[in-house]
Image (spheres, rainbow, N blue to C red):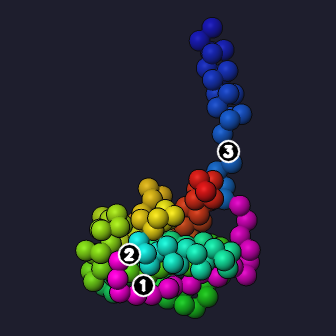
Amino acid sequence: MRLSLLVLSVAALGCTSKSSSPPPVDPTATVKFIPAPQGDVAPIVVAQLAKSQAEKRHVMVYVGATWCQPCRVFHEAVDRGEMTGKIGALDLIQFDGDVDAERLVMADYESQFIPAFTVPNPDGKASARHIEGSVKGDGATNDLAPRIRALLALANDAG
């Protein structure tokens, strides 16, 4: 009896679960850094959301630092075009965790580790959909790319 209940429970879970793999990415989709201007974070994010959505691009708030080795590795890979086709059409509003910490906290963009990537809410404040931290060295891009893709897939499911 217990075995049949277990089998039925597992079968029911299998029928209701969604595919865990993100949808395929356009091989020409680029990732771009958008340097954040001075001012309150939420209105900056709202303005970028409108612009990026008009261009059919996703938006995330990115927090890094000049001293952060995984941040530098990822940034350099984006600048060289190595992330094209790996993540999707994505605009990263770029903030420096050391310089912008106070204004980021005001919009709920707090993290314990960097790099940090957060999907914003429509009001420009941080959502609960975020990732933070990465491995050091050249493996940072291979660590971050699938995590960012999965985060975008979650954002698509929620939005």
Amino acid identity at mark 1: Ala
Residue at the image position 66 percent from the left and 59 percent from the top: 22
C-alpha distance separating marks 1 and 2: 8 Å
* Quarter of image, res 104: bottom left
Task: Pick whichever, 137 or 67, lies toward us.
Answer: 67
User: In this figure, which residue is indicated by the disc labeled 1?
Assistant: 36
Residue 21: image location, x then y, percent: 66, 55
Task: Examine the residues drawn in magenta and state their main secondary structure.
Answer: loop
127 to 68, vertically: above or below:
above
C-alpha distance separating marks 1 and 3: 35 Å
Amino acid identity at mark 2: Val
Q: Are marks 2 and 3 in contact (CB under 8 Å)?
A: no
Residue bounds of the magenta highlight: 23-40
Task: Pick whichever, 1 or 27, lies toward us.
Answer: 27
User: In this figure, which residue is indicated by the disc labeled 3?
Assistant: 18
Amino acid identity at mark 3: Lys
Label 2 SS: helix
Residue at the image position 27 percent from the left and 80 percent from the top: 98
